[in-house]
């Protein structure tokens, strides 16, 4: 099998290998890499794959996207095994039933080293970077300069710590993570800044997450800086992030079949969405052949995706600070990948080059401060075949944390992002009138301990509740006492960031 990747913005017949797509992260034209073809699962996968472990499923899925000539079977199996050996749950991403509501399930994605769903992808991405660099450097002759990579990423909370834990102490890899000052939770900040390994650097940037995300794209677009420092991406713009997340859709589907013993399951997935990477993995799973009835985008009050799905207009508005900060995003980078496929099916007439031309035009229109674009009726018609959406307020988020704690036998505690998903489930189950025949799987994206302020706001009046006792793991309790390594960036400007990166790289070599 030969699988190649192309840019969403390219109107030329160009493609790159899996390795190049992963190591460069972002295409030279600013587009995101997508597989030239979405592979299909085997005809009998529903029976042949149903009893596979998470790791075995991951191997089978990744094998469809990665040529064996690029990563041999034994190497890929070892990469997968090593990536998920760090998880606290043997099942990696267990599926649990919310007993207060029939057919409501939570997919717990927070059992990795940083207690967030990003670990599922970034443990794998870190090992991939190391694998490719070791292979490249082992082929060099004595005296030749080693190949290195400078990873630059932006985070609204969880990506940063997951990337740091996935890449700490990796040989020939330097990591720079930017996050908006005062806009991540204290524990999220501590998880990032208490990793003092020489190759790890955290920048607290005075601005918004969108400012940080824009800086990452500007660094990639600076060809001279990029070629000098070999810039790589760990944000969900990196295709390997999406690839690794596809597995838990298949895994949860098979777990649901086992738990319910139903032969023909109807299932909808509800995904708290900010940058769209998590739900995009579900789109690829569906297109590969997994029978997902619907994918539902659950947004907070920063609802650019919800507005688009309802209107076809994609427009920026100022970011609001909400109780679910990882979703406080104005422009959802990964939506570009999904939209490429929707345009290809409609206005692009299944022509990759025509689709790239349309996509490049839209993204150019969006790039101005008040940028926006509107897709055709045909494109939005293709979109709503696959996606539905909802927007959830701060008040509804708190109320849902209360409701689930109060009505579940084990007093289940949600983090605010997962509460956005569950509130959307409850609303849909009531409105769609299909909760007797359809199962709802809501993705639980982070451990509640990472959002103490909101969780306490919701639960402080319940008798016997204690955040220290009921929520906070011992591992996270220790963070507050650990030394920190952090650099404050006063102005979100490209030259300021690039100068800071160069200075920190020089310190690594001392």
Image (cartoon, rainbow, N blue to C red):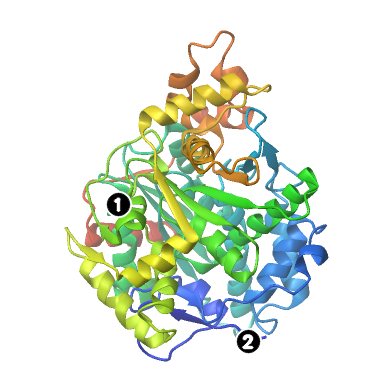
Residue 238 on image: x %, y %: 48, 66
Determine the image quadrant of residue 343: bottom left
Residue at mark 2: 2
**Camera-nearest residue between 278 and 296:** 296
Q: Is residue 10 visible?
A: no
Q: Secondary structure at mark 2?
A: loop
- Residue located 40% across and 62% down the image: 335
Rendering coords of residue 357 (x, y %): 31, 82
- First of labels 2, 1 by sequence position: 2
Q: Is residue 314 above or below residue 134?
A: above
Residue sitting farthest toward the top: 463
- Between 500 and 176, the residue placed more toward the observer is 176
In terms of secondary structure, where does tag 1 sit? Answer: loop
In the picture, which quadrant includes the N terminus? bottom right
Q: Position of residue 181 (x, y in %)?
A: 31, 40
Q: Residues within 10 Å of mark 2 (few under 14, many from 20)?
A: few
Where in the figure is residue 425, as x and y percent of width and height?
52, 40
Mark 2 and mark 1: span between their CA atoms?
Answer: 36 Å
359 sits left or right of 235 in the view: left
Q: Verify CB contact (< 8 Å) between mark 2 and mark 1.
A: no
Classify residue 99 by image quadrant: top right
According to the picture, the residue beneath numbered tag 1 turns out to be 330
**Does residue 218 show up?**
yes
Left or right of 328? Residue 246 is right
Name the mark on residue 1: none
| Identity of the residue drawn at 34% across and 73% down | 30
Is residue 185 placed above or below 208 in the rendered structure?
Answer: above
Q: Camera-side residue: 46 or 397?
A: 46
Please determine whether, in this image, residue 7 is positioned above or below residue 111: below
Residue occupying the point 57% across, 76% down = 38
Query: Seen in the image, is 374 located left or right of residue 384?
Result: left
Query: Which quarter of the image is occupied by the C terminus?
Result: bottom left
């Amino acid at each position: 099998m030969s699988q190649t990747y192309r840019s969403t913005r390219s109107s030329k017949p160009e493609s790159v290998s899996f390795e190049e797509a992963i190591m460069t992260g972002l295409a030279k034209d600013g587009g995101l890499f997508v597989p030239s073809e979405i592979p299909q699962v085997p005809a009998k996968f529903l029976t042949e794959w149903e009893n596979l472990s998470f790791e075995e499923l991951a191997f089978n899925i990744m094998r469809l996207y990665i040529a064996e000539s690029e990563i041999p079977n034994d190497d890929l199996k070892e990469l997968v095994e090593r990536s998920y050996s760090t998880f606290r749950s043997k099942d990696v991403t267990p599926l649990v039933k919310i007993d207060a509501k029939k057919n409501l399930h939570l997919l717990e994605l927070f059992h990795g080293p940083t207690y967030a769903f990003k670990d599922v992808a970034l443990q794998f991405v870190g090992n991939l970077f190391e694998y490719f660099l070791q292979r490249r450097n082992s082929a060099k002759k004595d005296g030749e300069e080693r190949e290195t990579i400078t990873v630059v990423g932006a985070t609204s909370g969880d990506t940063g710590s997951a990337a740091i834990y996935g890449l700490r102490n990796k040989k020939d890899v330097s990591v720079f993570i930017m996050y908006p000052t005062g806009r991540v939770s204290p524990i999220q900040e501590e998880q990032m800044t208490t990793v003092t390994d020489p190759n790890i650097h955290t920048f607290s940037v005075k601005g918004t997450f969108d400012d940080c995300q824009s800086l990452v794209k500007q660094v990639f677009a600076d060809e001279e800086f990029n070629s000098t420092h070999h810039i790589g991406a760990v944000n969900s713009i990196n295709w390997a992030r999406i690839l690794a997340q596809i597995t838990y859709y298949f895994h949860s589907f098979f777990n649901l079949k086992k738990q319910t013993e139903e032969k023909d399951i109807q299932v909808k997935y509800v995904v708290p969405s900010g940058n769209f990477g998590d739900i995009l993995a579900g789109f690829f799973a569906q297109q590969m052949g997994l029978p997902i009835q619907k994918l539902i985008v659950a947004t907070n009050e920063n609802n650019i995706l919800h507005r688009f799905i309802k209107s076809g207009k994609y427009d920026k508005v100022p970011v609001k600070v909400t109780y679910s900060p990882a979703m406080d995003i104005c422009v959802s980078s990964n939506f570009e990948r999904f939209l490429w496929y929707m345009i290809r099916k409609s206005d692009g007439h299944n022509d990759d080059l025509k689709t790239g031309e349309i996509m490049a035009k839209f993204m150019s229109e969006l790039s101005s401060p008040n940028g926006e674009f509107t897709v055709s009726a045909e494109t939005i018609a293709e979109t709503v075949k696959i996606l539905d959406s909802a927007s959830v307020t701060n008040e509804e988020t708190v109320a849902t944390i209360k409701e689930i704690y109060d009505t579940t036998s084990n007093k289940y505690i949600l983090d605010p992002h997962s509460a956005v998903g569950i509130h959307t489930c409850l609303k849909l189950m009531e409105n769609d009138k299909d909760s007797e025949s359809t199962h709802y799987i809501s993705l639980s994206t982070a451990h509640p301990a990472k959002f103490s302020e909101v969780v306490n706001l919701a639960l402080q009046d319940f008798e016997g509740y204690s955040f220290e006792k009921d929520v906070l793991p011992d591992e996270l309790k220790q963070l507050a006492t650990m030394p920190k390594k952090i650099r404050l960036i006063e102005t979100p400007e490209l030259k300021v960031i690039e100068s800071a990166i160069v200075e920190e790289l020089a310190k690594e070599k001392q």
